[in-house]
Image: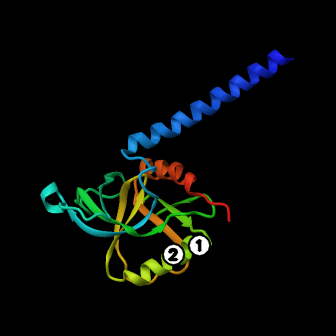
Amino acid sequence: MNGLKNVVGLLSLGLLLTVSSCSNSVRSLQGASSLDFPDGIYLIERTGDNHKEIYPFASNERRIRFNKEFIEKTDQDVKYIVINMGEYAPLELREGPKAEAQEDNRKRLMLNLTKGAKEQLKDFTTKHLNKLTTIVVDGEALTMHKIRTVIDGGQLQVTRCTDNACELLYVQLQDNIVKE
């Protein structure tokens, strides 16, 4: 009986390590580690296509890449984005993202923020009206938007991404679910 428990324990450990390494493989394919800084909506300080356009950095700034999987090639041709690490609203979800079909046969992900993240997003959008922001997941910018109004409902949507990009993001955002 102890031999059977050991085999089951080893199989469980092997499955856990396999799932963990698959998750890390998906993240490494995206290019950056979520350990660098939290996923969230960040204030954009500047953008550029080469290093000369974005340097030098202030101590609170970080250069990130724009993930082209999430947009049309003709929409936003920015290669680098400099974000302000102190000006962001965390992307903390109270439940898993929900995928919905769009009219153009692509998917949209609906995100419901936690109560705390909802309040932080409201404060962030109030403070940064008419400024550029970006949604950052796993160290990469997914979208760029100008804040045109205060966002106080606690719901966001990521639209116009390819099926493959939405599926990768769906998996990545499972780590952002927070129990309230």
Quarter assignment of residue 62: bottom left
Q: Position of residue 45 (x, y in %)?
A: 27, 70
Evaluate whether residue 17 shows in this view. Answer: yes
Label 1, secondary structure: give it. Answer: helix
Residue at position x 23%, y 56% from top?
Answer: 79
Label 2 neighbour load within 10 Å: few <14, some 14-19, many 20+: some
Q: Is residue 109 above or below residue 117?
A: above
Closer to us: 82 or 67: 82
Q: Are marks 2 and 1 in contact (CB under 8 Å)?
A: yes
Label 1 neighbour load within 10 Å: few <14, some 14-19, many 20+: some
Task: Specify the quadrant that holds the C terminus.
Answer: bottom right
Quarter assignment of residue 65: bottom left
Q: Taking 67 as reference, is 151 left or right?
A: right
Instruction: Look at label 2 and name its amino acid.
Output: Gln
Read off the residue under disc 2.
120
Residue at position x 47%, y 52% from top?
Answer: 169
Q: Position of residue 113 (x, y in %)?
A: 57, 68
Read off the residue under disc 1.
116
Q: Position of residue 38 (x, y in %)?
A: 46, 58
Q: Is residue 29 above or below residue 107?
A: above
Label 2, secondary structure: give it. Answer: helix
Residue at position x 33%, y 58% from top?
Answer: 71
